[in-house]
């Protein structure tokens, strides 16, 4: 039986403190979802995710559909059991990955025809098929298929994508038979009139939650913040609001200030594997020569395992030597930083100090 609810507990300006309840537990919001593309957040175990502060993760429908296959995951007890994660899981529709295969796909009203990047096999992803796959995975939140046009794009192309997104959203909502709930996705590029239209059309379909899609695809940070704030204000107050694919710590703070509740991004994990680490004093490129004999912890203000037990010199050595442990320790730190940032924002909203927190965090260092 589906169990889902969202409760708005308090606000500070437009920033919201809430609680999202699913069959696999509660999530305090605003919350960041680490990305587990292939049913794993790269380089860390579910136990380590919990220690970093994760309450919910995101998994990718496109990749799991192609490998190992949604039927196999269903037959093995569903995605939670398959990946040994007992908390909530949100799955995306697979659409963004398919749309990024510009040379391998074709879009029409039925859906998206594409060829697998793995073996070239032909597939058709429809709104109904996306819901079928996500139902088999057993996620707590399933995203409907939408059309995300690349930007910049002509206004008529963005307008056509908004119309198709609404049609697909209705089909996906009506087809969903999974254990969780479907969320709608608002499109419209950077055009406020199209964003308002898309939000109104999606709200009329009465989804349990709503996402803001089609941002963080090349726009400057100011445009991301503007569109997130504009769109969030046009979504129901009593439903969770999810900004897809964002982003930098500064983007998260600005979006929370604009009324957003949920986030995901590969930035903390991908950057960790590339040697870029987020700290209380800004970003650190750990491969730089200046850290070769540095005995200090990466971030003296951080309480994660990496900072508590290892020096900058050791982290640099691991990275330069291409040791697997570098990815693990770097990822643990970056996730701890991102999830700690979300916790600090929740505390600031609860105490009515979020405006001051935002100003201090965004102040030039």
Image (tube, rainbow, N blue to C red):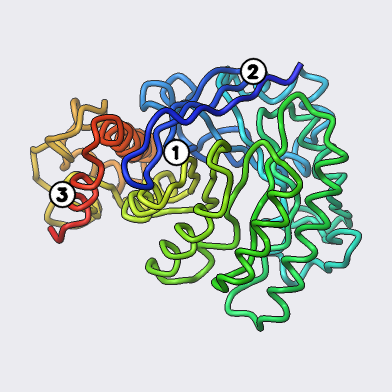
Query: Compared to 310, does 241 lie above or below?
Result: below
From the image, tell me which residue sits under label 2.
23
Q: Secondary structure at mark 3?
A: loop
Q: Secondary structure at mark 2?
A: loop
Query: How far apart, in angstroms, are the residues tagged by discs 1 and 2?
Result: 19 Å
Of residues 217 and 363, the one nearer the viewer is 363
Q: Quadrant of residue 134?
A: top right
Expressed as whole percent of the image width and height from the top left, the position of residue 144 reads: 74, 46
Name the residue beneath numbered marker 1: 32
- The answer to which of marks 1 and 2 sits earlier in the sequence is 2
Q: Is residue 273 above or below residue 80?
A: below
Q: CA distance from mark 2 to mark 3?
A: 38 Å
Judging depth in this view, the residue of 92 and 184 nearest the camera is 184
Q: Which residue is mark 3?
A: 281
In-front residue for pair 49/342: 342
The residue positioned 51% from the left and 35% from the top of the image is 41
């Amino acid at each position: 039986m589906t169990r889902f609810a969202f409760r708005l507990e308090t606000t500070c300006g437009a920033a919201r403190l809430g609680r999202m309840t699913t069959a696999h537990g509660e999530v305090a919001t605003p919350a960041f979802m680490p990305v587990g593309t292939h049913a794993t957040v790269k380089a860390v175990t579910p136990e380590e995710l919990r220690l970093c502060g994760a309450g919910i993760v995101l998994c990718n429908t496109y990749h799991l559909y192609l490998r190992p296959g949604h039927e196999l995951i269903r037959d093995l007890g569903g995605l939670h059991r398959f990946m040994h994660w007992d908390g909530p899981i949100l799955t995306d529709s697979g659409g963004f990955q398919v749309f990024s295969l510009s040379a391998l796909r074709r879009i029409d009203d039925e859906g998206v025809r594409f060829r697998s990047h793995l073996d070239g096999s032909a597939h058709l992803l429809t709104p109904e098929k996306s819901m079928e796959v996500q139902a088999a995975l057993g996620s707590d939140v399933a995203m409907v298929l939408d059309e995300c046009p690349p930007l910049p794009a002509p206004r008529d192309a963005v307008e056509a994508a908004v119309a198709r997104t609404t049609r697909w959203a209705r089909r996906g909502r009506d087809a969903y038979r999974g254990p969780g709930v479907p969320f709608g996705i608002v499109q419209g590029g950077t055009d406020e009139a199209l964003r308002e239209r898309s939000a109104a059309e999606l709200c009329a379909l009465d989804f349990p939650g709503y996402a803001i899609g089609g941002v963080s695809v090349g726009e400057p940070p100011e445009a991301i913040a503007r569109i997130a704030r504009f769109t969030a204000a046009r979504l129901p107050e009593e439903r969770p609001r999810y900004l897809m694919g964002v982003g930098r710590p500064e983007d998260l703070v600005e979006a929370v200030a604009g009324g957003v509740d949920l986030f995901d991004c590969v930035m903390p994990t991908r950057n960790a594997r590339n040697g870029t680490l987020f700290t209380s004093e800004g970003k650190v490129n750990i491969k730089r020569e200046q850290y070769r004999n540095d005995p200090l912890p990466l971030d003296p203000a951080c309480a994660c395992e990496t900072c508590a037990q290892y020096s900058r010199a050791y982290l640099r050595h691991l990275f330069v030597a291409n040791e697997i442990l570098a990815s693990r320790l770097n990822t643990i730190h970056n996730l701890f930083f991102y999830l700690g940032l979300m916790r600090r924002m929740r505390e600031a909203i609860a105490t009515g100090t979020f405006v001051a927190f935002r100003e201090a965090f965004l102040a030039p260092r």
